[in-house]
Amino acid sequence: MANFLYIAGYVFIGLLLRRSPQFPQNTGQILNAYVIYVALPALVFQKIPYLTFGKELLYPALMPWILLLLTVPAVLAIARWRGWSRSTTGAMLIVIPLGNTSFIGFPMIEAFFGPEGIPYALLYDQLGSFFILSIYATIIAAVYSHDPGEDSHRPSAKTIAWKIIKFPPFVALLAAFAVRGVEYPEVAQHFIDSLAVTLVPVIMVAVGFQLRFRLPQEDRGPLVWALGLKLVATPLVALALLIGFGLDDLAVQVTIMEAAMPAMISAGALAIMAGLAPTLSAAVVGYGVLACFATLPLWYFVLQYLQQLI
């Protein structure tokens, strides 16, 4: 509970800083860049080399892809039923399948499970969420940001591959796997630890700084659907798929909790940059972050209760 309160405090600090004229409007983006280029790679080097290989690694690596395959047809069916516009449909196809498995996921997983849960969260994020953002979400943004009759400039396979290869946390992940079993010099270990420890406060301050809550009437229905699918339906499906593998397994618990994370900030930013329901995309991210402070503890207690029951 103390760690959870710390996270809420960091978000509140970000909200306060946004009101201060001393901090420019792009402060959130600068903090995010620090996390992506410094803190997150440091965390990867800190945790991954000590990861023990086993079948439990398949849970966080495969679950994001399974949920993507199930979520996309559900969103398309709801879009047709509710008569959503092309822009809204494209936005929902981006923000609903992609969870905030790093910026929110890492600190929340650490709060609930301690440092032992972080390696599984890293695998869920890097082998799942990151690839889905880089490949699937990029294609959806290119397709839905243009009318069907227009000459759409879709990203080439080479562009997507290069984007993945040069992404700092992914480079760090490959390097960390390469040096598994190699003990770092003591000074290097302390240096890595000192950078990794900055991840949670910087991430959550950035999240608080970027929260926005403007929402017109026509976006309220899709918002409710997005929050319901992301915070309730998605983790419920993950629980149903994994309950047979034993809820006492830390990898299973972390995977389900990662599936319960709110919409990814980067996915919302991608939808906004593509002109796909910008206000709605921002609202799904903002309201999702606030709502997860209630839904994530509930999912955690459900997992603990079912673990004792089973």
Image (cartoon, rainbow, N blue to C red):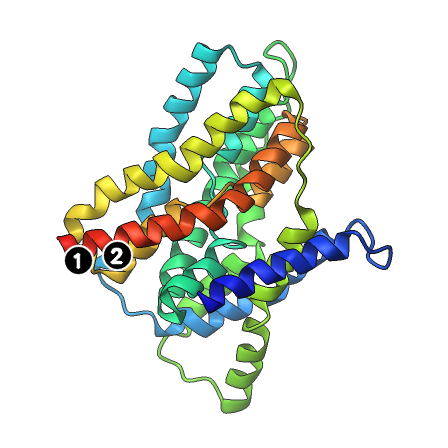
Q: Secondary structure at mark 1?
A: helix
Mark 1 = which residue?
308
Residue 272 figure quarter: top right
Q: Is residue 136 left or right of residue 123?
A: right
Marks 1 & 2, CB-CB < 8 Å contact: yes
List x then y, in percent, for residue 239: 26, 44
In this rendering, is residue 23 above or below 177? above
Give 283 or 39, whichever is nearer the viewer: 283
> Residue at horizontal 67%, vertical 23%?
216
Give 209 or 64, whichever is nearer the viewer: 209
Residue 168 figure quarter: bottom right
List x then y, in percent, for residue 262: 48, 43
Mark 2 = which residue?
304
The amino acid on which the numbered mark 2 sits, given as a three-letter code, is Gln
In this rendering, is residue 217 above or below 108? above
Which residue reaches farthest bottom?
186
The amino acid on which the numbered mark 1 sits, given as a three-letter code, is Gln
The numbered dot on residue 84 is none
Q: CA distance from mark 1 to mark 2?
A: 6 Å
